[in-house]
Amino acid sequence: MSGPGGIVAWKRVPSLRFLLPKGSVAGIKRLLASAEFIPRICIVGSGPAGFYTAQHLLKHHKQARVDIYEKLPVPFGLVRFGVAPDHPEVKNVINAFTQTAHSDRCTYSGNVTVGKDITIKELQKAYHAVVLLKPDLSSETAVVLGHGNVALDVARILLSPLEILRKTDITEDSLTVLARSKVKRVCLIGRRGPLQVAFTIKELREMINLPSARPFLNPADFKGLGDAIKDVPRPRKRLTELMAKTALEDPGEVVASRWASASREWSLKFLRSPLEVLPMADGKQARAIRMAVTRLEGTGDGTKAVPTGEVEEVMCGLILSSIGYKSVPIDPAVPFDPKQGIIPNNLGRVLGAPGLYCSGWVKRGPTGVIITTMNDSFDTAQSVLEDLQSGALDVSGAKEGFDLVRSVLQSRGIHPVSFSDWEKINAAEVARGKLSGKPREKITDPREMLELISH
Ligand code: NAP
């Protein structure tokens, strides 16, 4: 038997014969119809939501088989590419994901683009349930804008001393670029006010404590916030108080002297919404960004930034964007809400499409830290398990799972990357990293990855 055991499901059928009186054809038929086959579940995407969903399914269903498909040759999605290089503790989840991938009831296939190499309809033919996870990770603007954690990640990496970054898994190429960087000031621009920032306190604290940079927060933005802070939930209260303290209070002698000698600086600018990037005369580089000055309208979560009519320009030569993510439709067979960028669902069950489930940012929108994704993925996995138990998920017919998908891919000239192939890439990255005292030196070119495993 090759692959994750399509044959195991069939083996149970002949044994039924011995349970029935000879000649009872109708009885055999009835029993065959009700015989439960091993549930084959397929997960699209190998980021944290994919692996957490797989982990929960394998743990709580002792027969289910789970196959994970990934567009890139390498697994782990945002944990590999999106978690900042100086946050190695977040990357530790990779150990748990690796354990999941090693289960003999799980396969990983990289280098397979669902929607192009194989359709959702074909996956549904091969699996009892299909779980979708496909955020579009590309942002559309070309400016460093936004008051989320990604914005702080970007600012922190731009301002961090190279000797700190050298010990992380940041790529050599990025280090080379950063070594040449002339950036001394990073201004984080948000369209709303201090009470609406999307970053969290841990990440703000890291910025305030950056050894080589001093914060520049305008006291005027924080004076008079007192009453408004009183009514907000405790995490936001603490976050706002930390910003206000940094802006308004004397930091003490030690910190003040560190800040005085810092060669770099970062600041938060509020109530500015991007309008236009203004180019240099040669048209090749940015000169400034034009922004609409905004004011706040509404209260609580519904507080909106509306333009006042006033416009302002901030001079800058580098503009990066970090205004969040939006998922895109994966396949015409899957319902999609383009406004919210999510698949309409009830606890992960895709509405109007039995047997299809979703998890991660395509289920709830692009928010939350890794724990949020973990809980959310466990919820989706729980929905699959409940549907298996209640019979809502029909497993009365055998499905071939990966064996079928592999033959379809083969006929299309696609060569999936297995988890053991990934482990070869991983070993090569770790070996390369060792040479420069880093946890790994990431290979970024998919062609190089594929070449490495073809030997
Ligand atoms: P985010 O938290 O959604 O923040 C996006 C920021 O961009 C907000 O300040 C938002 O302002 C602003 N924005 C959105 N659309 C805009 C527009 N059209 N014009 C101007 N500003 C706009 O997104 P993110 O920073 O990409 O993070 C995504 C998720 O990953 C978050 O849940 C985050 O916490 C998580 N994450 C966590 C970590 C960590 O744990 N260290 C690191 C990175 C990311 P409004 O509020 O006004 O919309």
Image (cartoon, grey):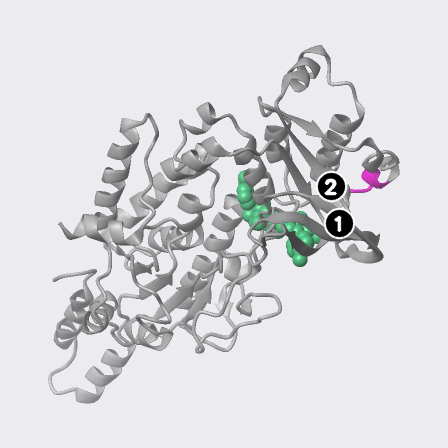
Q: Is residue 207 left or right of residue 354?
A: right
- Residue 384 circle label: none
Q: Looking at this view, name the residue that lies furthest to the front.
A: 282
Instruction: State whether residue 313 appears in this view.
Output: yes
Q: Looking at this view, name the residue that lies furthest to the top.
A: 253
User: As shown in the figure, which amino acid type bears the numbered disc 1?
Assistant: Arg
Q: Is residue 251 left or right of residue 317?
A: right
Occupied quadrant, residue 277: bottom right
Residue drawn at the location 51% of the way across and 62% of the way down: 362
Mark count: 2
Q: Position of residue 189 (x, y in %)?
A: 69, 45
Q: CA distance from mark 1 to mark 2?
A: 7 Å
**Is ligand 1 within 8 Å of the beta carbon of the residue shown at mark 1?**
no
Residue drawn at the location 58% of the way across and 37% of the way down: 155
Q: Which residue is mark 2?
A: 269
Q: Are marks 1 and 2 in contact (CB under 8 Å)?
A: yes
Considering depth in this image, is 348 or 305 the residue closer to the camera?
A: 305
Q: Position of residue 204 (x, y in %)?
A: 64, 33
**Region rendered in magenta:** 228-233
Residue drawn at the location 44% of the way across and 48% of the way down: 78
Q: Is residue 116 left or right of residue 229?
A: left
As drawn, 331 above or below 135: below
Q: Which residue is mark 1?
A: 272
As drawn, 133 above or below 367: below
Considering depth in this image, is 231 or 261 the residue closer to the camera?
A: 261
Dot 1 surroundings within 10 Å: few (below 14), some, or many (20 or more)?
Answer: many
Q: Position of residue 187 (x, y in %)?
A: 67, 39
Magenta stretch: includes residue 219: no
